[in-house]
Amino acid sequence: MRDFKGKLAIIIGIWAAVTAAFHLYTAYYGSFEPRIQRATHLFLLLPIVFLAFPSIQSQKEKLPNILDWILATLALTPSLYLILQSETLSRRVELVDKVTSIEYFLGVLVILLILEACRRAVSSIFAALVVISILFLFLAPYLPGSLSSRVYSFDRVVELMFLSGDQGIYGFLTGIGSTVLFVFVLFAAVMIRSGVGQFFMDISVAIAGRFRGGPAKVAVFSSGLYGSISGSGVADVYSTGSFTIPLMKKVGYAKTESGAIEAVASAGGPFLPPVMGAGAFIMAEVTSTSYLIVIEAALLSGILYYIGVVSTVHFEAVKKNIKSSPKEWNVGWKSVLKRVYLLIPFALMVYLLITGISPAKSAAVAITTMLVIWVLTERTKFRISILMKALEYGVKSGAVIASALAGAGMIVASVNQTGLALSVGNLITKYSFGSVWIALLLVMITVIILGAGIPATPAYVITSTIAVGALTAFNLPLLHVHMFIFYFAILADITPPVGVTAYAAANIAESPPLKTAFVSPKHAFAGFVVPYVFIANPELLLGQGTFAWYDTALTFILTAVGVIGLAAAFMGAFFDKVNWLERAMLTIISAAVMSGNFFVSVISCLLLLTVIVYLYFKHKNKKKGKKTVKTILA
């Protein structure tokens, strides 16, 4: 991503301010007619991709070249046409009326522009996946069996991708981005630039810096807090990892381990409310559920994920005898408490959501509140140039998401029109042999494969399109299924062979990317366990069903205990190193704790506590033995 300077920075800053003003206005007062709203959204954001992201990485430090400017200018025309012709197009009958020559030309142009935008700003793998989905529309009629579908002419494919009201480039995914998502991206950008990012880092250092393995725990806390508003694992890595990874290496963590811990901590940010990133808004839309219910359902499972990460980090520090952060890095609570007012926009946004205000309007009010606080509390440091940089960062981030959602919209259109979703769903049902757990396993494998090399949001959208039907056939609630897929779409970012978040962390840690991706799942194991646990124990998804609070609390505690036990088994340490037999005991008993059967879970929990007591006294006796040896030698 280019960093704009000079006159270009001023131009982009003004463009960013206009973009922010449009989205804040529509968030607060209501959006325009869908076609106008979505077209204006892409009109403002798509050109930024070609200016901010070079065609090849070697041009990252250079100004946009003539090709970039040509593509940015061309990117204005398809959306502008839809805005100017919206009234005429609203009377058009899809798949009946002919596609005009100008519509045909602009349709082909915008498809090519979105493909290039996806290649530049998202990933080459994702761009290739979009190309394959378009080609599938032409090839499907010649494929055998359930993969076959009706013939689509070239002009109808262009119509589907360009002119359709609810599919393709300007479909419902772009609609979510234009009405809700971009406002939250802007919220994250303003919060981070106004000092909240550093505030989160200081809180994390104050909480965890003084404990064993402090730098790694700081990475976990800070990345979780930061990621909860940024909604992007990769952005999280580059923001917090530049501080935490060198610090981890300084106290004894290996390069690969440092990168893996930061990647896992950053990847989990989208699990945590109140923002959670693009996936949460899409989930709310496609499940016809309020955004508040989505973030309620995600809360406990997100906390369990981070309990698992913190546990693996702690037991790794025990095993390798890694110390706390250097004293010069410590932050006092007094310094932190002085800036607690920075949390007011968060609290206000959550309050507005609870009272029934729309997510977009809640975010718009929170942004305004943050700006007021920023100006009042930082009068000597506040600069318009800093605010413009925040808006510029928000627009760049929004352009990436807009490209991803437009590309995903084309994939979803292809999948729906060819019936591929039904075909894949039937295959999952067939090879699950009537077992919901096998079906869940197959969906997990599918989303991790599809998520290789592409961001979590497109991976979630694509997999949910083709797999939701198969899982709901087992009478699983729709939101539970989407939450399951969402979890593994995020985890795909840190799993080999191509985990984009793991690769970003490896870049900072100067460690081998593939090796970092292979180490990462060890620390993220809770993420691979928790989705199965909340399917078996839906009381973990708050607001789902009529579960008593004590049922939810007990299930959460038992699951947390099981996660901690499994972390100790995987890392080979508790109070001290544990042998293979003790690791086997911890694994079996911890898994039983999370079985979902009340009596089995409670009995297993008591057994696990017994094992922990045994490990404690073993550790104490070992320390006494060392003291005795030292005394004899003395």
Image (cartoon, helix red, strand yellow):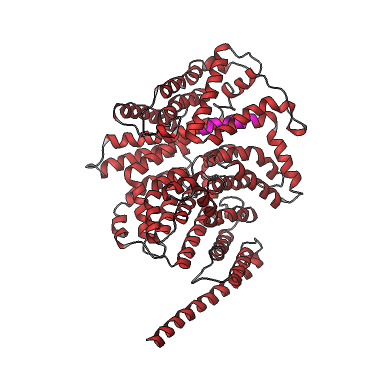
Which sits in the foreground, 342 or 463? Answer: 463
Say if the magenta span includes residue 412: yes
Q: Is residue 145 left or right of residue 380?
A: right
**From what the image shows, is residue 395 above or below residue 83?**
below
**Which x, y percent locates residue 421?**
68, 36
Q: Which residues are magenta?
A: 402-414
- Asked if one can make out residue 90 in the rendered structure from this viewpoint, the answer is yes
User: In which quadrant of the rendered image does the N terminus lie?
Assistant: top left
**Which x, y percent locates residue 474?**
71, 47
Q: Residue furthest top?
A: 101
User: In which quadrant of the rendered image does the C terminus lie?
Assistant: bottom left
Q: Residue furthest bottom?
A: 632
Residue plotted at (50% across, 26% down):
38
Q: Main SS type for the magenta part?
A: helix
Which sits in the foreground, 199 or 418? Answer: 418
Residue plotted at (65% across, 46% down):
443
**Which x, y percent locates residue 255?**
44, 55
Q: Quadrant of residue 409?
A: top right
**From what the image shows, is residue 153 above or below residue 621?**
above
Q: Residue furthest left?
A: 380
Which sits in the foreground, 297 or 7? Answer: 7
Residue plotted at (66% across, 67% down):
600
